[in-house]
Image: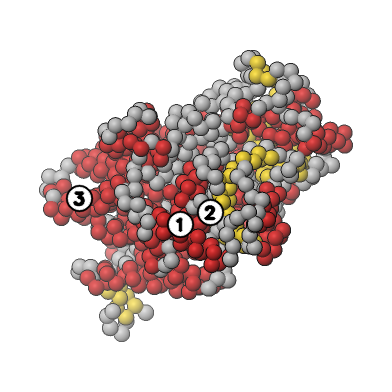
């Protein structure tokens, strides 16, 4: 069977099952499908995407069928197959929730022009039916950096990083800049774990940092192991990552940075239902509710809490950009002049530390 | 006392904790291999131990029962391996790999309601003022019971293998099942018991991960620890005390590289994270080329199935 | 009660009947598991075993079976030669990764040159990379008598670290805005492992897998080396008397399995996967070990075993998406299938004699 009939079959399935096609007048019912890189039970990245899926069901009831998802999909050929299967089986919109699905998403989207594809954290939109979305997590990290800078007594902040990619480096820079702003003596020790998820290794990394006198731990890996490790030493605090990690309240988890995909998913599916859907390159942050700061607990003094919340609100209102000049690169060369905010292009491809961070990014 | 900004006492104390899961799993596998059976399913058994231990501990509120539950759960899974390989004569390598696949799947199914829960805390052994001794207090008297238990188990396995009749029989079965059978020993029964012991130890190691080290349940929590345990057994050339050294070496290098990073040492991280494996290979080469001849120490009947043809 | 009695030679009937029996048993046990999870077991089983072959979307999924089975078969055929001779290469996953890095590295080094020599050179480079990675345990084994199971396994982890280094460092797409991952070969026609017939799933890697099956079959049946391999596995002492050099055999078997695994990696990276990424390795090297055993270390058996394995992956995915089964249930289901296949294997090698004297 050739490609033309393949697409015809898909269109047929779509028409038969859901009695509507994608057009300006909207749709009666939308079938939304999700591709996950990990298990729903990872308590972090995939869990939060699945929470977004559940929010869609909550928001639209029986106007949406969002029961189709696939966990643990490896990148590459497997992703392409899963996407094709979903497209064939009548999904109207497919969310691919990991960077590694970028090429597979674009390849399959080219074959199914009537189906909408939404790719998380990527930048490629080869055909009209591919949109990309991401979240400005660095905004949340600015708030967390502020709390970290205020809370550290040893002036040593530890950062458990995963891989040396722009997303992670951006978070490190944002955290450091804001810690430094409220506490000029603050230093940052970065440990590269080379994994997104390895609870035992993350625990070891946290322990190593604590032994070095670090009393505030920021993590960009997904398990709660660093918090559990922090709990063993009085006076050490940390932050929830990806999900709220509320089990470690009120301390060591004093706040958290939450990926909240629900507003975006609800918005996009709503647009598909009412006919206002259009291709986007979405990169939203605190203002759109995609990046949330979890409750700041009483372990944080009231004035620090107020300061952090003020910063959060300023970022949310758009009156403050976390990367506002003057900022120099690590080697001392100028990056942003006084008052200039970082262009998104610089942020997306960030591959340098800002001035004051010690150590090298592994190359 | 500092080296490159790292306190060695602290480093030793951390690596002792980091090594417990792989040490327990490795000593269990050592006994299995001594009996002539190669069970590559350690990873699967460990993760079954992790989830069974976690569920038991959360339901009963007792970490102690949790460890028991972990050992029982993993031993249960190892029984599948025992029946397949010992009774039904299936290939051990393939069965072990299938066991890992099955264990990973089943544990994830069982754990679906347990994500994001904190298990009851395992407390440290109270040594009173001893824990405050300089250096030694930190290394020797500041741990949870499992750290000590794992070392006791190593000592016990060593003593049993070396001095007891049971150990002699076990080794005989691993060296030549036909000869052992001719002498009237129940080869199959002994091997099944060894496999169950190996499962229970892997389960304890897994439960240590989910109850103490991490502590929480997440899918794939073992993240390859079972494979490292397998490596340690060969590294140790089937000698119990060398399992202790091997586990400390593995735990130690990974802890050391993270500590070096935290201390701000300029090290090529990505190469250091592969260093435990490279060093194991080097140590293996040295041991096997020296007069010790590690591979000569391997149980002669390792991996071969036994069928009593009378 | 019953006792087992070894058959003088494997039963012809049971050799063919056991896989069928195993699949039936798995359907029963797996169906029970699906029922426990609150799903209709009949629909679940049909989705896994029937739909990919004859269902509504079979026209697409049949091809995908080949895509999935290709690398499994290619690697498993190589491994089976060593396994037969008692040489345990457990590290095919590492050889697969290094083969992919070598192959992709050669292709990307000359980007965007368009000549038809690029792809053949990449094939050679991929095979060479896998061969090289397998030579480490082989030479350590022959020179120092170091255990090859362990060394090859350790090298998997080393290869994985090199892979993440490649994806974030030396093979990273210079136009990828700093994101991890190499250029995609779909944008580089001269170096692309194309699908030979559209939607058939047939690419050069699948062709190579079929060639490997035939070559291995001929080698084992007709060639002196095949005879030596079989002899070394069945009777090592006799093999030595017959003039088999163990050193040569180790180097050959490890080399062949490494080269084939490297080839599989190279075809995968330039075709279905498309690029080097941090998570490029998805366990083909380990699954292939199971495939090799399921196929009873026989080239034709491996061909079938690879296809069955691929079926459980593809069908399992269907069941998981369409019926909302957790992917863990599919993993457990695959585990069960393997257990049953291994368990009933007994029937072809042994006779079960009930104590009242009747033989089955």
Residue C357 location, quadrant: bottom left
Which residue matches tag 2? A114
Residue A274 location, quadrant: bottom right
Which residue matches tag 1? A7
* Circle 3 residues within 10 Å: few <14, some 14–19, many ≥20: some
The residue mark sitting in front, 2 or 3, is: 2
Left or right, residue A139 beside residue C216: right
Are labels 3 and 1 on one chain? Answer: no
Left or right, residue A84 beside residue A228: left
Residue A100 shows in the view: no
Q: Quadrant of the N terminus of chain C?
A: bottom left
Q: Give above or below for C181 relative to A51.
A: above
The CA distance from mark 1 to mark 2 is 9 Å
Element at label 3: helix
* Circle 1 residues within 10 Å: few <14, some 14–19, many ≥20: some
- Mark 1 / mark 2, whichever is N-terminal: 1
Q: How is the image coloured?
A: secondary structure
Please state the chain letter of the residue tagged with numbered disc 2 in the rendered image: A
Which residue matches tag 3? C215
The CA distance from mark 2 to mark 3 is 46 Å
Q: Are the two marked residues, 1 and 2, in contact with CB atoms closer than 8 angstroms?
A: yes
Q: Quadrant of the C terminus of chain C?
A: bottom left
- Residue lying at the far right in this picture: please name it: A302
* Circle 2 residues within 10 Å: few <14, some 14–19, many ≥20: many
Residue C99 coordinates in the image, percent (x, y): 35, 38
Identified at 43% across, 66% down, the residue is C56
Q: Are the two marked residues, 2 and 3, in contact with CB atoms closer than 8 angstroms?
A: no
Element at label 2: loop
Residue A224 coordinates in the image, percent (x, y): 66, 45
């Amino acid at each position: 069977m050739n490609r033309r009939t393949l697409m015809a079959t898909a269109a047929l399935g779509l028409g038969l099952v859901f009695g509507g096609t994608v057009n300006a007048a909207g749709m009666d019912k939308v079938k939304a499908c999700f591709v996950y890189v990990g298990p729903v039970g990872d308590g972090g990245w995939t869990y939060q995407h699945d929470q977004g899926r559940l929010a869609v069901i909550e928001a639209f009831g029986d106007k949406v069928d969002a029961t189709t998802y696939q966990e643990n999909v490896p990148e590459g050929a497997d992703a392409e197959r899963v996407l094709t299967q979903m497209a064939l089986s009548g999904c109207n919109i497919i969310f691919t929730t990991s960077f590694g699905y970028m090429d597979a998403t674009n390849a399959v989207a080219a074959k199914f022009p009537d189906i909408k594809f939404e790719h998380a954290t990527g930048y490629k939109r080869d055909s009209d039916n591919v949109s990309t979305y991401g979240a400005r997590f660095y905004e949340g990290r600015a708030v967390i950096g502020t709390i970290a800078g205020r809370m550290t007594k040893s002036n040593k902040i530890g950062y458990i990083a995963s891989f040396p990619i722009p997303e992670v480096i951006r978070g490190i820079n944002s955290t450091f800049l804001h810690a430094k702003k409220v506490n000029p003596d603050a230093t940052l020790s970065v440990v590269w774990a080379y994994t997104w998820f390895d609870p035992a290794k993350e625990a070891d990394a946290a322990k190593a940092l604590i032994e070095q006198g670090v009393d505030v731990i920021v993590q960009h890996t997904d398990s709660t192991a660093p918090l559990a490790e922090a709990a063993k030493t009085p006076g050490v605090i940390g932050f929830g990552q990806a999900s709220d990690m509320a089990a470690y309240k009120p301390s060591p988890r004093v706040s958290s940075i939450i990926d909240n995909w629900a507003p975006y998913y609800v918005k996009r599916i709503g647009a598909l239902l009412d006919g206002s859907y259009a291709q986007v390159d979405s990169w939203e942050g605190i203002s759109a509710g995609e990046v949330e700061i979890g409750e700041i607990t009483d372990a944080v003094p009231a004035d620090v809490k107020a300061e952090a919340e003020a910063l959060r609100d300023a970022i949310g209102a758009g009156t403050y950009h976390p990367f506002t000049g003057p900022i120099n690169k690590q080697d001392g060369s100028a990056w942003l002049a006084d008052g200039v905010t970082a262009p998104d292009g610089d942020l997306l491809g960030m591959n340098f530390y800002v001035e004051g961070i010690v150590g090298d990014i592994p190359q | 006392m500092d080296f490159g900004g790292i306190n060695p006492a602290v480093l030793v104390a951390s690596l002792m904790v980091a090594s417990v899961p792989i040490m327990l799993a490795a000593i269990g596998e050592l006994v299995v291999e001594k009996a002539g059976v190669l069970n590559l399913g350690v990873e699967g058994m460990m993760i079954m131990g992790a989830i069974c231990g976690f569920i038991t501990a959360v339901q009963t509120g007792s970490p102690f029962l949790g460890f028991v539950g972990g050992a029982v759960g993993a031993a249960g899974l190892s029984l599948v391996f025992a029946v397949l390989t010992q009774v039904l004569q299936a290939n051990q390598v393939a069965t072990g790999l299938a066991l890992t696949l099955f264990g990973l799947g089943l544990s994830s199914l069982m754990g679906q309601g347990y994500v994001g829960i904190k298990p009851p805390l395992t407390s440290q052994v109270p040594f009173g003022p001893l824990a405050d001794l300089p250096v030694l207090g930190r290394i020797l008297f500041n741990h949870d019971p499992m750290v000590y238990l794992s070392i006791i188990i190593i000592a016990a396995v060593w003593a049993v293998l070396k001095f007891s009749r049971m150990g002699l029989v076990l080794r005989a079965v691993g060296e030549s099942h036909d000869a052992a059978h001719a002498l009237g020993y129940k080869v199959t029964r002994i091997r099944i018991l060894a496999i169950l012991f190996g499962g229970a130890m892997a389960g304890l190691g897994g439960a240590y991960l989910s109850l103490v080290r991490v502590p929480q349940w997440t899918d794939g929590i073992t993240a390859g620890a079972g494979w490292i345990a397998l490596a340690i057994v060969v590294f140790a050339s089937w000698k119990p005390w060398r399992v202790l050294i091997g586990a400390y070496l593995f735990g130690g290098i990974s802890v050391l590289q993270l500590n070096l990073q935290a201390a701000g040492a300029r090290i090529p991280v990505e190469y250091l994270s592969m260093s435990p494996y490279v060093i194991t290979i080097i140590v293996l080469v040295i041991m096997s080329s020296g007069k010790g001849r590690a591979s000569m120490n391997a149980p002669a009947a390792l991996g071969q199935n036994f069928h009593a043809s009378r | 009660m019953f006792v087992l009695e070894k058959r003088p030679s494997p039963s012809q009937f049971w050799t063919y009947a056991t896989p069928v029996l195993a699949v039936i048993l798995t359907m029963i046990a797996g169906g029970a598991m699906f029922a426990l999870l609150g799903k209709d077991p009949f629909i679940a089983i049909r989705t896994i075993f029937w739909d990919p072959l004859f269902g509504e979307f079979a026209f697409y999924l049949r091809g995908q079976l080949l895509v999935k089975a290709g690398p499994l078969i290619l690697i498993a055929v190589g491994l089976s030669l060593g396994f037969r001779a008692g040489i345990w290469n457990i590290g095919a996953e590492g050889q697969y990764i290094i083969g992919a890095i070598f192959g992709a590295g050669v292709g990307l080094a000359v980007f965007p040159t368009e000549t038809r020599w690029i792809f053949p050179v990449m094939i050679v480079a991929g095979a060479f990379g896998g061969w090289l990675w397998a030579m480490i345990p082989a030479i350590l084994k022959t020179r120092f008598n170091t255990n090859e199971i362990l060394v090859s396994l350790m090298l998997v982890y080393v290869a994985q670290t090199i892979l993440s280094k490649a994806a974030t460092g030396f093979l990273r797409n210079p136009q990828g805005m700093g994101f991890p991952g190499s250029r995609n070969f779909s944008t580089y026609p001269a170096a692309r492992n194309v699908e030979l017939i559209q939607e058939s799933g047939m690419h050069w890697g699948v062709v190579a897998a079929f060639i490997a099956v035939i070559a291995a079959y001929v080698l084992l049946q007709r060639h002196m080396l095949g005879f030596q391999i079989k002899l070394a596995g069945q009777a090592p002492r006799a093999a030595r008397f017959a003039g088999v050099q163990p050193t040569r055999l180790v180097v050959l078997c490890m080399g062949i399995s490494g080269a084939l695994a490297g080839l599989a990696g190279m075809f995968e990276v330039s075709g279905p996967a498309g690029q080097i990424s941090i998570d490029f390795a998805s366990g083909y090297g380990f699954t292939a070990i199971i495939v090799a055993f399921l196929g009873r270390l026989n080239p034709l058996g491996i061909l079938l075993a690879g296809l069955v394995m691929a079926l459980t992956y593809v069908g399992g995915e269907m069941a998981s998406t369409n019926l909302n089964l957790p992917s863990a249930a599919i993993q457990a289901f695959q585990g069960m299938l393997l257990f049953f296949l291994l368990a009933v294997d007994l029937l072809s090698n042994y006779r079960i004699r009930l104590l009242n004297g009747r033989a089955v």
